[in-house]
Amino acid sequence: MGIISIGVGTCTLGRRQVDRDGNVASETPARWEADPAGGSVAIVSLNPETMEQDGPVEVFGDWQAGQYLARVVELIHPNRQINVPDLEAMIRRAAMDGLDLCDYCEDCYMCRDCIVKEWKEDPGGE
């Protein structure tokens, strides 16, 4: 049995500078700090006996719910198949079929930060 810790926070990428000979001149490690207003989600496996980190930290953007939820399901090793739906694909397909989800939340006025609006406006995806 293992324990999975999931948190919201801020991720800062690391940086390594080398000189002309390939020697490390300076290095700043990557870090993740818990922050309720952060834009990333970290998944950490913990050893249940020591509560120490047991493996690498995996960091996702907070908008990548499908990816980090799928990873959590993979880490818990369920005894049966679990389906984490691809919400992005569903919304893109619905927009292509003419469904306008914005009709349902037009009073919220949150379009500037709306991932549904972004997906709807680019139904082809990447």
Image: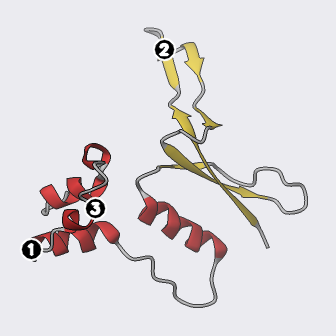
What's the residue type where badge 3 is placed? Cys
The label on residue 98 is: 1
Q: Which residue is mark 3?
A: 105
Does dot 3 land on a helix, a strand or a loop?
loop
Whichever of callouts 1 and 3 sits on the residue coming sooner in the sequence is 1
Return the x and y of residue 37 as percentages of the image width and height: 54, 39
1 sits to left or right of 91: right
What's the residue type where badge 2 is placed? Val
The quadrant the N terminus occupies is bottom right
Give the mark toward the camera: 3 or 2: 3
113 vs 108, nearest the viewer: 108
Above/below status of 34 relative to 67: above
Q: Residue furthest right?
A: 49
88 sits to left or right of 26: left
Return the x and y of residue 70 as percentages of the image width and height: 49, 69
Q: Are marks 1 and 3 in contact (CB under 8 Å)?
A: no
Does dot 1 land on a helix, a strand or a loop?
loop
Q: Classify residue 25 by image quadrant.
A: top right
How far apart in space, not on screen, are marks 1 and 3 (Cα)?
A: 16 Å
Whichever of callouts 3 and 2 sits on the residue coming sooner in the sequence is 2
Binning the other alpha carbons within 10 Å of mark 2 as few (below 14), some (14 to 19) or many (20 upward) gives few
The label on residue 88 is: none
Does dot 2 land on a helix, a strand or a loop?
strand
Give the mark toward the camera: 1 or 3: 3
What's the residue type where badge 1 is placed? Gly
The label on residue 18 is: 2
Binning the other alpha carbons within 10 Å of mark 3 as few (below 14), some (14 to 19) or many (20 upward) gives few
Q: Residue at x 53, y 27 (%)?
A: 14
